[in-house]
């Protein structure tokens, strides 16, 4: 994979990891968990986790050296998805 493509992939992974943190904090602070938006945020969080797992699997196949710094993150995400 070209270095420019690796940078783009890493940027996308880092962005989505930031969004995961945002949604986790948002859900933890939510007062009324019966709201429709709460369910939507939960679904978005699951989708983001799945997307990052898929991107990390691609990175593992294509760029093992760069993947090593995300290896623990992948393990945690896979565990959180069940």
Image: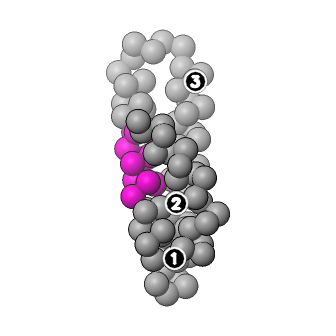
Q: CA distance from mark 2 to mark 1?
A: 14 Å
Residue situated in front as seen by the camera: 38 or 72: 72
Magenta-drawn stretch contains 59: no
Quarter of the image containing the C terminus?
top left
Residue at 36% x, 30% y is 40
Residue identifier under label 3: 28
Residue 19 in view here: no
Examine the rendered structure and indicate whether residue 30 appears above or below residue 4.
above
Rendered location of residue 71, percent (x, y): 58, 58
Residue identifier under label 2: 13
Magenta-drawn stretch contains 53: yes
Residue at 55% x, 44% y is 76
Number of residue marks: 3
Q: Does label 2 or label 3 sit earlier along the sequence?
A: 2
Residue identifier under label 1: 63
Examine the rendered structure and indicate whether residue 3 appears above or below residue 70.
below
Which residue range is magenta in the image?
44-54
Q: Nearer the viewer, mark 2 or mark 1?
A: 1
């Amino acid at each position: 994979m070209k270095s420019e493509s690796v940078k783009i992939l890493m940027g996308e992974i880092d962005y989505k990891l930031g969004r995961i943190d945002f949604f986790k904090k948002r859900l933890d602070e939510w007062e009324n968990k019966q709201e429709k938006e709460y369910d939507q945020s939960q679904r978005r969080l699951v989708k983001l986790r799945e997307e990052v797992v898929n991107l990390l699997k691609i990175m593992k196949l294509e760029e093992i050296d760069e993947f090593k710094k995300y290896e623990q993150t992948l393990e945690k995400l896979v565990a959180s998805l069940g």
